[in-house]
Image: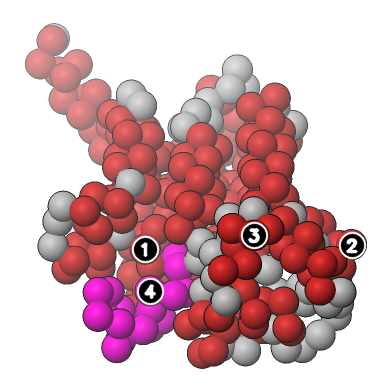
Amino acid sequence: MVRRSVKIMWFQINQNLATVRVIMLFLLIFIFIFSSVRPVCDFAGAYEIGITPWVFPLITNDYICQLVIMAAAILLFCNAPFKSEAHNYILVRSGNLPWTMGVCLYIMLLSFLYVMMILAAGIVAILPHLQPSAGWGQTWGTLARSPQFYSQFGISLSVNDYIIGKYRPVEALVISFALEWACCTWLGLVTYFFNNATETMFGSVVAAAFVFLDITIENEWSYAFFKISPVTMAQLRTLSSTHSIYHMTIGYATSFFTISILAFVGLCLLTPYVKKQFSSIRRRKVE
């Protein structure tokens, strides 16, 4: 089954990755990230200082960037359950279980490639002033503690002082990448499950609701609901047990994503059989 599932995963990648929709989406997000980070080069150039490559954790912890990234992630998976002209032919040869598992693996792989593209966009944006270093460097440290430079150089990217002070760059990069990947995968599986189960676009609506849940909680609802907001948990700045609003830890976010992703994979695997049973019941009633 594993071998067939992997083949189906690569089939989906070959079918969908080169489509106009996915290419345009990757390109637009690349341009958005590039334009958000690029003004930092103006600041670095004015003061003749370098920029260390640890921009990814800062991108994913910027409120606006994270919202745009996750909203765009829904568009990656909005065509779930990813049925093509060859769907019925492949399904007969592979079986429901390998097909569904292959789609789940495809969602995970596409999410990984999407997050990798975001990481690459941030680094490309700072290439003119890139300075290899194991530390955060003067540029990020200054911007984290001196917000007056933002308006002076037109910088929209918010550099979080908590992350700069709390985490080493490599640590922040690894954790932020894992959280971002988990969140994109989570949204993809939610979209796939509900779209497939209802045979409508309901999954895309549910995923969109979770993307904007963070805004709704901050403005309308109790802060306790942050603990079910995947977009909130994908931001390293929110994962401090001492924070006055969020009261969450990295361990909590890890448990949430691990358990819920496994649960949605299980639900996705069961969906074809449940639908088949309901179809059989309906046919018997008609007869």
Q: Classify 10 Å Cα crowding around label 3: few (below 14), some (14-19), many (20 and above).
A: few
The residue that disc 4 covers is 238
**Residue 232 disc label:** 1
Q: Nearer the viewer, mark 3 or mark 1?
A: 3
Give the CA separation, mark 4 to mark 3: 28 Å
Kindly indicate whether the residue at mark 3 contacts the one at mark 4 (C-beta within 8 angstroms).
Answer: no
Of mark 1 and mark 2, the one earlier in the sequence is: 2
Q: Which secondary structure class fits the magenta region best? A: loop
Quadrant in the picture for residue 203: top left
Amino acid at circle 2: Pro
The magenta span reads 234-250
Q: Nearer the viewer, mark 2 or mark 3?
A: 3
Amino acid at circle 4: Thr
Describe the element under mark 1 as helix, strand or loop.
helix
Of mark 4 and mark 3, the one earlier in the sequence is: 3
Q: Is residue 111 left or right of residue 214?
A: right
Q: Is residue 217 left or right of residue 195?
A: left
Of mark 2 and mark 3, the one earlier in the sequence is: 2
Give the CA separation, mark 1 to mark 2: 32 Å
Q: Quadrant of the C terminus?
A: top left
Q: Classify 10 Å Cα crowding around label 1: few (below 14), some (14-19), many (20 and above).
A: many
Q: Is residue 182 visible?
A: no
The residue that disc 3 covers is 152
Identify which residue is drawn at 58% across, 22% down.
84
Describe the element under mark 4 as helix, strand or loop.
helix
* Relative image position of residue 205 (x, y in whole percent): 32, 34
The residue that disc 2 covers is 128
* Residue 148 forms part of the magenta stretch: no
Amino acid at circle 3: Gln
